Amino acid sequence: MNIAELTRIIEKRAPLSLQAEWDNSGWQLLGAGPKQEIGRVLVALEMTPAVAQEARDAGAEVVITHHPLIFDGLHKVDSNDVTGNMIYSLIRAGISVYASHTPFDRCRGGNNDYLAALLHLQDVALIEADEEGYLRVGYVDGECDIAEYTQQLVSWLGLDRRSLRFCGDAGQPAAKIAVCTGAGGDFIYAAHQAGCDLFITGDLKYHTAQTAKALGLNVLDIGHYGSEKIFTDNMCAYLRTMMAGGSCEIIASKLNLDPFDQLF
């Protein structure tokens, strides 16, 4: 496996043509040519100093992340700040970094399809009102209310129930459900227009929650991390399938990258 082959495999599922205008997916650091052979790839939600160390310890030549290492624009590389120090350390270790962000949110089999599958939704499809292609809608197999469905969700996703936030009426039936990984507050009108009983997303803002309440849309905020930590398992499974019988080892990061801790 070489750099060019790895790039082709990633972008077969999540082509950069799906990238949002504001995004920065693709190679973040690339220290060798397309024919460089790769023996180990580490997959993680994002690059942190701990992930950089994990990659060095594992002997990985490449790290694939969901969130870009370089995102808001990089005007200088300063080893005295967090990002600059990581870039220096990764370059010194000869580690390249690729990010598949919005392309992996939008693509078939990406984050949103995978989350819908983990939530046991049936007849999953795109929501037509979402022209950007992030939202998925599906149906609960059976009858339950939102509170009962949420109890199952916590188990399916391995979440701490204390990290969840909800606005609406948890006693209402849960039948038609929309999902959007990451920060999906911008799509509450699309979810409402689609007639969903519940919208599951992360990073819901105060005023957005007030709007959802006024619309009568039930929204469950499972957190940015809670909705996107699934990236690692999903990407690893895809790469291992595509590289079956090959010599490249795909390693899933073992780190808990949730920056928030529970006080009580």
Image (cartoon, rainbow, N blue to C red):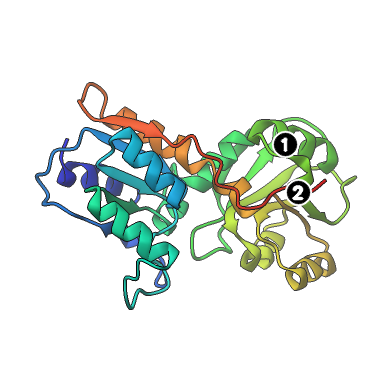
Residue 49 position, x and y percent, is: 43, 51
Residue depicted at x 17% and y 45%: 3
Give the Cα separation between the discs numbered 1 and 2: 9 Å
Query: In this image, 100 relative to 166: left or right?
Result: left
Q: Can residue 24 be seen in this view?
A: no
Mark 2 residue type: Leu
In this rendering, is residue 127 above or below 132?
Answer: above
Q: In which quarter of the image is the C terminus?
A: top right
Residue depicted at x 65% and y 56%: 202
The residue tagged 1 is 154
Q: Quadrant of the N terminus?
A: top left
Residue furthest to the top in view is 245
Residue 53 position, x and y percent, is: 39, 44
Residue 62 position, x and y percent, is: 27, 44
Query: In this image, 61 relative to 225: left or right?
Result: left
Query: In this image, 207 relative to 97: left or right?
Result: right
Residue 190 position, x and y percent, is: 64, 64
Mark number displayed over residue 164: 2
Frontmost residue, 174 versus 233: 233
| Of callouts 1 and 2, the N-terminal one | 1
Residue furthest to the front in view is 80
Which element type, helix, strand or loop, lies under badge 2? Answer: loop
Which element type, helix, strand or loop, lies under badge 1? Answer: helix
Q: Choose top left, top right, bottom left or bottom right for residue 17.
A: bottom left
| Number of marks | 2
Residues at circles 1 and 2 in contact by the CB criterion of under 8 Å: yes
Residue depicted at x 37% and y 32%: 251
In this rendering, is residue 234 above or below 131?
Answer: above
Residue depicted at x 47% and y 53%: 105
Dot 2 alpha-carbon crowd within 10 angstroms: few under 14, some 14 to 19, many 20 or more: some
Mark 1 residue type: Val
